Structure formats: C-alpha cells, structure tokens
C-alpha cells in the first residue's frame, strides 16, 4: 500500500529505480551524491553481523538500560494516567469544572517546564 522509498529500493538492489524516485522527490536532477551516500550506507549496514546481539554489548548497555527504565518508571508512577485524566481527577477531588480544567493546564505547563529543564540538564 505504501510507496517504495529510495532507500528500500536500494536495499533490494533497484539502484536505477531508486535514483529516479529520488529525483522525483527532490525535484532536481543532481542527486548523485545523495544516491551514493544511500548506497554506501546500505552496504555498511549489510556488514553488521547480529545487530540485535550488538545491543547487549557493554558499550550500549547504558542506552539500553535507559530505553527500558524510563518508560517503565512512567508507567509505574502513573504519570500518564494523571496527565490524561487530570480534569476528571481534579473534579473528583472537589475542584469545580473550571478549576479542574485550569489545574490540568497548570499540570501540563509544569510538565513542559520540567521537560525543558531536563533537556537542558
């Protein structure tokens, strides 16, 4: 259903079709450098042996640990539920409907602010 991308065509060895598709996408005729980069990247990716096993190497262990722990802590702390149901939650504990909505907005703004601080940090 989805159209082929130049990269997927290169992976299947259809270099001329990939070049034609890339020209159409970019709207220029000079795509030689980009097509050569795509071909080189495809060939380099074929040289990698056991890509899933490589994730378990000591070098990538901190990345893998964070990729697993961050979403897990999000679920365990329940912050996703609080953010999604904030207006209902605040209304249930006694806030009026306007105050509940405002509290949800404040909670969202605090979340955005904390995200900016954590990105900077």
Image: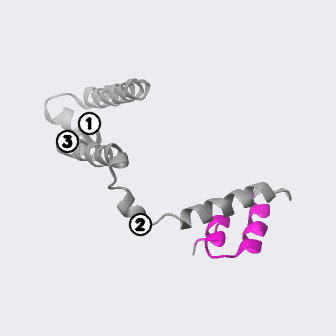
Question: Which residue in the protein does label 2 denote?
Answer: 50
Does residue 106 appear left or right of residue 23 in this picture?
left
Upstream in the sequence, badge 2 or badge 1?
2
User: How far apart are labels 3 and 2 at the CA level?
Assistant: 36 Å
Q: Earlier in the sequence, mark 3 or mark 2?
A: 2
Front residue of 56/71: it is 56
Which of 79 and 60 lies nearest the eye of the viewer?
A: 60
Q: Secondary structure at mark 3?
A: loop
The numbered dot on residue 78 is 3
Tag 2 secondary structure:
loop
Cα–Cα span, label 2 and label 1: 48 Å
In the rendered structure, find residue 87 and report the number of the disc placed on it: 1
Q: Residue at x 58, y 71 (%)?
A: 2
Left or right of 37, for residue 60? left
| Secondary structure mostly taken by the magenta-highlighted segment of the chain | helix
Q: Callout 1: 10 Å neighbours few (<14), some, many (20+)?
A: many
Q: Residue at x 36, y 56 (%)?
A: 55
Using residue 32 as the reference point, say whether residue 47 is left or right of it.
left
Q: Measure the C-alpha gap from mark 3 to mark 1.
A: 15 Å
Q: Is residue 21 magenta?
A: yes
The image position of residue 43, as x and y in percent, is: 61, 65
Would you place residue 113 above or below residue 63 in this image?
A: above
Residue 97 left/right relative to 119: left
Q: Is residue 58 above or below residue 118?
A: below
Task: Check if residue 66 falls in the magenta segment.
Answer: no
Compared to 92, does 95 lie above or below?
above
| Residue range highlighted in magenta | 2-25
């Amino acid at each position: 259903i989805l159209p082929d991308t130049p990269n997927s065509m290169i992976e299947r060895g259809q270099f001329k079709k990939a070049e034609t598709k890339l020209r159409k996408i970019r709207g220029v005729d000079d795509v030689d450098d980009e097509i050569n980069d795509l071909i080189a990247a495809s060939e380099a990716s074929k040289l990698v042996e056991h890509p899933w096993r490589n994730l378990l190497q000591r070098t990538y262990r901190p990345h893998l640990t964070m990729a697993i722990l961050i979403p897990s802590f999000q679920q365990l702390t329940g912050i996703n539920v609080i953010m999604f149901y904030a207006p209902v939650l605040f209304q249930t504990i006694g806030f009026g409907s306007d105050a509940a909505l405002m509290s949800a907005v404040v909670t969202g703004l605090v979340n955005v602010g904390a995200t900016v601080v954590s990105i900077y940090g």
